[in-house]
């Protein structure tokens, strides 16, 4: 579970999101996402979206990780996120789920979904 959490958190980081080699390592070629807004993405559209991002002073706080084995080589990671801006203001509270598949000797995210939710206390 530690590897999946580390990789999940890495995908929240601007520097990772701007590194095409890292994105190719972390995301499965058949990647699909349903974002917090309800927008659907595939591998190519998420690559384009990340490439267009600009650096921000805020960060994504994530917590409450749970891992569910769907099969020996398929894991579902559940957790919560909140955007914290430079002043400490919190917004965009979400529940998230990712499905990771073992491809050879590395885990790749094949599916991700973010669902807006009410505020929660940060751990």
Image (spheres, helix red, strand yellow):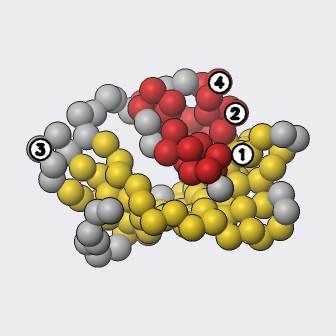
Lower sequence index among marks 2 and 3: 2
Q: CA distance from mark 2 to mark 3?
A: 33 Å
User: Is residue 91 shown above or below 31?
Assistant: below
Q: CA distance from mark 4 to mark 3?
A: 32 Å
Whether residue 63 is visible here, answered yes or no, is yes
Q: Is residue 69 left or right of residue 95?
A: right
* Residue identifier under label 2: 25
Q: Which residue is label 1 attached to?
A: 108
Label 2 Cα crowd, 10 Å radius (few <14 / some 14-19 / many 20+): some
Q: Label 2, label 4: how many angstroms apart (C-alpha)?
A: 6 Å
Answer whether labels 1 and 2 touch (C-beta < 8 Å): yes
Hey, which quadrant is residue 23 in on the image?
top right
Q: Position of residue 44 (x, y in %)?
A: 63, 39
Is 66 situated above or below 90?
Answer: below
Secondary structure at numbered mark 4: helix
Which comes sooner in the sequence, label 1 or label 2? Answer: 2
How many C-alpha atoms fall within 10 Å of the one at disc 3: few (<14), some, or many (≥20)?
few
Q: Residue furthest right?
A: 104
Q: Residue sitting at 65 percent across and 56 percent down?
A: 1
Dot 1 and dot 3 residues touching (CB under 8 Å): no
Q: Distance from label 1 to label 2 (Cα)?
A: 7 Å
Tell me: 116 left or right of 3. left
Q: Residue tagged by mark 4?
A: 21
Q: Is residue 65 above or below residue 50?
A: below
Q: In front: 118, or 51?
A: 118
Horizontal and vertical percent for residue 100? Answer: 70, 55
CB within 8 Å, label 2 to label 4: yes
Left or right of residue 78: residue 104: right
């Amino acid at each position: 579970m530690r590897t999946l959490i580390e990789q999940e958190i890495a995908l929240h980081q601007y520097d990772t999101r701007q590194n095409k080699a890292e994105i190719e390592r972390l995301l499965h070629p058949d990647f699909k996402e349903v974002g917090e807004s309800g927008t659907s993405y595939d591998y190519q559209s998420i690559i384009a979206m990340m490439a267009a991002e600009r650096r921000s002073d805020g960060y994504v706080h994530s917590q409450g990780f749970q891992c569910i084995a769907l099969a020996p080589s398929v894991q579902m990671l559940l957790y919560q996120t909140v955007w914290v801006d430079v002043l400490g203001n919190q917004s965009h509270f979400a529940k998230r789920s990712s499905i990771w598949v073992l491809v050879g000797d590395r885990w790749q995210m094949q599916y991700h979904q973010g669902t807006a939710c009410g505020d929660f206390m940060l751990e």
